[in-house]
Image (cartoon, rainbow, N blue to C red):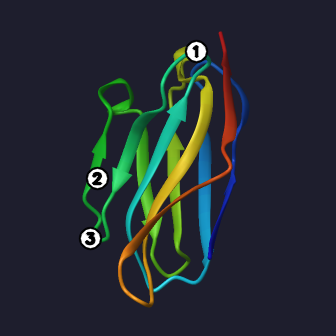
Amino acid sequence: QVQLVESGGGLVQAGGSLRLSCAASGSIFSINFMGWYRQAPGKQRELVAAITTRGSTSYADPVKGRFTISRDNAKNTVYLQMNSLKPEDTAVYYCNVLVGQFMGGMKEYWGQGTQVTVSS
């Protein structure tokens, strides 16, 4: 079993910054895909940013140039640095991790979610 623990959410004024962290622990042979999703009230969950094992990154258009995803493979941790935050960034943010199993195969895990609120 794998546990994901998120931290770093909170309330910030527009233009401010927050850094989210998501640490994975447990039965981990390898970690492939790591990403951050968000879900605003009344909206579907959407992919915000993703990073591969080799460090290739991708971002949703609304956050390009403002958010940066990174990972520390030694700590099995993924980060999301969010700058120039806007009220429309308000959502619950979830980390998503694709874990390689010791017995083979891959399994997807989700963090518990952390609230990010940006006031205008």
Horizontal arrangement in the rendering, residue 9 relative to residue 73 (left or right): right
Q: What SS does tag 2 mark?
A: strand
- Reading the image, the residue beneath label 1 is 42
Callout 3 crowding tier (Cα within 10 Å): few <14, some 14–19, many ≥20: few
Q: Nearer the viewer, mark 1 or mark 2?
A: 1
Count of numbered circles on the image: 3
Q: Is residue 73 above or below residue 51?
A: below
Mark found first going from the N terminus, 1 or 3: 1
Residue 55 image offset from top left, x and y in percent: 29, 65
Q: CA distance from mark 3 to mark 2?
A: 9 Å
Residue extending farthest to the top is 120
Q: What SS does tag 1 mark?
A: loop
- Reading the image, the residue beneath label 2 is 57
Disc 3 + disc 2, Cβ < 8 Å = no
- Reading the image, the residue beneath label 3 is 54
Residue 93 image offset from top left, x and y in percent: 59, 39
Q: Amino acid at mark 2?
A: Thr
Q: Is residue 80 above or below residue 17?
A: below
Residue 82 image offset from top left, x and y in percent: 52, 38
